[in-house]
């Protein structure tokens, strides 16, 4: 008989409020200046889907009860209209509105090829649907914490990143995994903004990539992911600030050196490589001590590693003071 010890951050799934319970609470956001735009959008239309995703028959996927949260799942009618995806902001939108759902529908997601290269036994390219046939999909309920001090609880569907690492067959010289999103300014107007070093790029260490929490996302709310979330393939690193969870990935490169990332080139003093959630390390322009949950409108104290320290703290044991969690 399998006996599994309950982790410190887990609650039974029965205690997590289902998304449907919250679908009629769209008006509550209007009292929050930070989320007023999301509330207005959530009240005027259902989440958009411009085309049928060929992976739709793979869903629903089984829920993994080892990954849940103590807060209610944020309804899709809110989260589908509250997205940081600068590629789809107008180059003249200097407020970087989160209302990009309609614009994101211009992104073609089939065919979608993913390049695996670098310190691997052999470089190769694989289509997203071929990749999905080689992995085991499951649902995980994760907390998501943005560096902007808002948060949400999301039911992601996907597979553990370690499965992709195994498929890649990295050499022992591989120390980092570099990731890159699409580059298509014809459909993504934000990529015409010359002040940013497109395409979006991120990287993690091999130890982070193979940690049990590192999750490659293909769906959300137990169906294929809407484009504004980062379809057809994005990353979810629940112990790090959201900008590390790169969207719409087209390349994985295994490197022996630390790669430069998008924010390293853009604002390295504000967005460091590690980006681990840390309430004791403020952003240069605001505190990280608390966060506002956009699904409940409640404010909560921020937890070190977003509450996932039991699973990831050992990765940083030799870094000294955890002030390095945000700044280099």
Image (cartoon, rainbow, N blue to C red):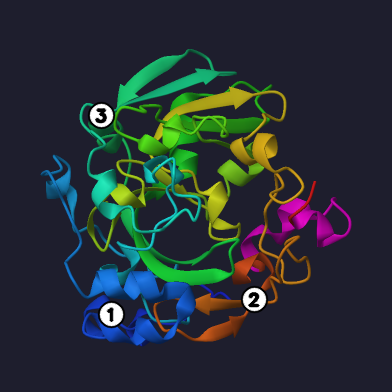
Q: Relative to 108, is 234 on the left or the right?
A: right
Q: Is mark 3 on a helix, strand or loop?
A: helix
Q: Do the residues labelled 2 and 3 touch (CB within 8 Å)?
A: no
Residue positioned 72% across, 51% down in the render: 270
Q: Which of marks 2 and 1 is in front?
A: 2
Q: Relative to 143, is 171 on the left or the right?
A: right
User: Where residue 198 sits in the image (x, y, percent)?
Assistant: 51, 30
User: Where residue 314 sits in the image (x, y, percent)?
Assistant: 74, 57
Badge 1 is on which residue? 18
**Compared with residue 176, is residue 273 higher up or lower down, i.e. above or below?**
below
Check if residue 324 falls in the magenta segment: yes
Q: Do the residues labelled 1 and 3 touch (CB within 8 Å)?
A: no
**Compared with residue 70, is residue 97 higher up or lower down, i.e. above or below?**
above
Q: Is mark 1 on a helix, strand or loop?
A: loop
Task: Report crowding for label 1: few under 14, some 14 to 19, many 20 or more residues within 10 A (C-alpha).
Answer: some
Q: Do the residues labelled 2 and 1 touch (CB within 8 Å)?
A: no
Sequence-wise first label, 2 or 1? 1
Task: Out of 99 and 300, give the one closest to the viewer.
Answer: 99
Report the span colored magenta: 310-325
Marks 2 and 3 sit apart, C-alpha to C-alpha, by 39 Å
Marks 1 and 3 sit apart, C-alpha to C-alpha, by 32 Å
Q: Nearer the viewer, mark 1 or mark 3?
A: 1
Badge 3 is on which residue? 130
């Amino acid at each position: 008989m399998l006996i599994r010890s309950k982790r410190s951050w887990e609650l039974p799934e029965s205690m997590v409020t289902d998304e449907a319970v919250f679908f009629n609470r769209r008006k509550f956001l209007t009292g929050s200046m930070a989320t007023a735009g999301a509330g207005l959008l959530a009240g005027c239309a259902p989440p958009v889907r411009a085309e049928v995703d060929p992976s739709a028959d793979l869903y629903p996927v089984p829920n993994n009860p080892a990954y849940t949260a103590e807060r209610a799942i944020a309804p899709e009618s809110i989260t589908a209209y509250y997205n940081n995806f600068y590629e789809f902001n107008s180059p003249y939108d200097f407020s970087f509105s989160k209302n990009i759902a309609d614009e994101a529908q211009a992104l073609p997601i089939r065919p979608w090829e993913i390049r695996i290269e670098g310190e691997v036994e052999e470089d190769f390219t694989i289509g997203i649907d071929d990749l999905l046939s080689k992995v085991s999909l499951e649902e995980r309920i994760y907390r998501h914490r943005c560096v902007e001090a808002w948060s949400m609880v999301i039911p992601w569907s996907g597979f553990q990143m370690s499965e992709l690492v195994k498929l890649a067959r990295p050499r022992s010289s591989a120390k980092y995994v570099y990731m890159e999103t699409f580059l298509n300014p014809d459909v993504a107007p934000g990529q015409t903004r010359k002040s940013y070093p497109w395409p979006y790029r991120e990287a993690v260490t091999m130890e982070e990539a193979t940690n049990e929490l590192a999750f490659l996302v293909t769906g959300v709310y137990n169906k294929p992911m809407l484009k504004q979330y980062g379809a057809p393939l994005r990353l979810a690193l629940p112990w790090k600030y959201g900008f590390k969870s790169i969207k719409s990935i087209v390349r994985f490169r295994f490197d022996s050196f630390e790669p430069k990332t998008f924010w390293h080139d853009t604002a390295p003093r504000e967005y460091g490589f590690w980006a681990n959630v840390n309430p004791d390390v403020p952003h240069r322009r605001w505190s990280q001590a608390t966060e506002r949950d956009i699904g409940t409108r409640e404010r909560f104290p921020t937890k070190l590693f977003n509450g996932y320290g039991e699973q990831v703290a050992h990765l940083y044991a030799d870094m000294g003071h955890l002030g390095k969690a945000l700044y280099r």
